[in-house]
Image (tube, helix red, strand yellow):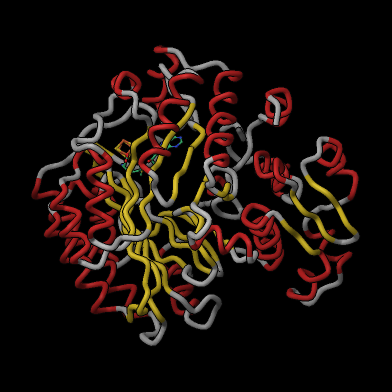
Amino acid sequence: MNTRLLQKYNKPGPRYTSYPPATFFHDGINADHYRNMLVKSNTQHPENISVYIHIPFCKQLCHFCGCNTSCYPSADFIEEYIETLIKEIESVSELLDKSRPLTQIHWGGGTPNSIDLAHVKRVMEVLLDKFQPAAKAEIAMECNPAYLEPEHIDQLAAMGFNRLSLGIQDFNEEVLKLVNRKPSKYPVEELIARMKANNMDGVNIDLIYGLPGQTPASFRNTIEKAIAISPDRLVTFSYAHVPWVKSAQKKLEEIGLPSVEDKLAMFETAYDLLTQKGYEAIGMDHYAKPGDELSVALKNKKLHRNFQGYCTQETTGQVYGFGASSISQLQGGYYQNKKDTRQYIDQLNNNGFATDKGYEVSKQDIIRRTVINEIMCNGFLDFDEMAKVFKISTDELKIVVGYNDEKLQDFIKDNLLKIDGNTIKLLENGFLVVRNIAMEFDPLLSQGKGQYSKTV
Ligand SMILES: C[S@@+](CC[C@H](N)C(=O)[O-])C[C@H]1O[C@@H](n2cnc3c(N)ncnc32)[C@H](O)[C@@H]1O
Ligand code: SF4
């Protein structure tokens, strides 16, 4: 795909990790709504339970960070946080049907691997006691390799972790210095070998393009190094610049961000090198080896997505979030906890729940969410089949998602998708602008809630 086309489609838009996007969450949703929906979720689809644990602490804050995190607190505060997290798990699990299988546990942050692993072990024991883990449950943690010791990998494996994601961001240490980040403490090859020795099959590397100091040539070196290390999966995040939400990002403007042309060239270089080396492109920014579950799911049109990234429809369930700022993603709605850790602890200890805001979905939202997910994940939509799922006519479905043939003409002309009768299929380059295509099926977008980062 040429830079001109990428530039044409490079405009602000949601990432659609939820539908509607988190900018629609409102404070009319409280703990009572969450409690009711927890009970309802037992009879809703999917039956599987996914758990998300949020650890919002980092030893050093990266200037680019868009995550919900904060400076490292005292050991006592971390202990209080973990105690509260356990209380939350107990309150929620009491309302959930014990026969539902726990298929996924995801630890994110912040830097979950920076806390004493004895805390992680305690929480895991409570989870495995309160829920019914499936035989092949996926247990993952996002790790910052600056704080990852090889022995930690053995300890995490002994607790049942089978997937670790390493936040590399860039192998170039000059770039890391500019964004206030430490490099991996050990050679990444050594960490990955240790994971493999522990039979972990889902080794992932996160990279970001669009940071100060990066050039297309320097990012090429980073991608080549990543390919040489051969992770099972790799993500190249487009740096999301949202200084109106994350004021630390203003520092990156002062240092100097790469030009739009350079940023797009980095994206293209990564895409070309990774796909030439046999990685399958998944969605807009993920890559996986051909035998990886994500690649297989994409082939079978069974790819799914939640706030934690791409996943397969088999393993993922309704997501129950624990910890400050965590979001529960249930069939009936989204429920986000207080972001401030002190408020989270106090509210949870007073009420048993710390819901801050959320959004309960209507039938129309569910239809739009399913359509947008199909496009974002599988690059395919059969209007007739989808209408059957929702027991409405194809014309009614088109009205709900605000669709008309005219809307997609530009994408067709640019060879990004094709329409065949009542089906829409993204062509190879279509995934590069998949957020733009999804936006055409989102009538709520015109309400203009919140500002979004650019799509490429
Ligand atoms: C919670 S962080 C990862 C865990 C760990 N704290 C670390 O930094 O390695 C998840 C990922 O989000 C990505 N990320 C963070 N801020 C971002 C931003 N502003 N734009 C795009 N990606 C971002 C990074 O690639 C990071 O690895
Ligand atoms: S990128 Fe990771 S380590 Fe850096 S501040 Fe964000 S959560 Fe913390």
Q: Give the residue drawn at x 32%, y 44%.
A: 166
- From the viewer's side, name the closer residue of 150 and 448: 150
Q: Quadrant of the N terminus?
A: top right
Q: Quadrant of the C terminus?
A: top right
- Residue 28 seen anywhere in this rendered image of the structure: no
Q: Which of the four quarters of the rendered structure image does ligand 1 lie in?
A: top left
- Asked which quadrant contains residue 38, the reply is bottom left
Which residue of the protein is positioned furthest toward the bottom in this rendering?
Answer: 99
Q: Give the residue drawn at x 31%, y 78%.
A: 131
Residue 120 in the image, given as x and y percentages of width and height: 19, 60
Q: Give the residue drawn at x 29%, y 23%.
A: 173
Residue 172 in the image, given as x and y percentages of width and height: 34, 24
Number of numbered discs? 0
Give the left or right position of residue 315, taking residue 105 as reference: right
- From the viewer's side, name the closer residue of 262 and 337: 262
Residue 209 in the image, given as x and y percentages of width and height: 47, 29
Give the answer, above or below, for where 374 lies relative to 268.
below
Give the answer, above or below, for where 115 lies relative to 322.
above
Q: Give the residue drawn at x 19%, y 44%.
A: 148
Residue 108 in the image, given as x and y percentages of width and height: 33, 51
Give the left or right position of residue 439, taking residue 205 as reference: right
- Residue 249 seen anywhere in this rendered image of the structure: yes
Give the answer, above or below, for where 410 lies relative to 130.
above
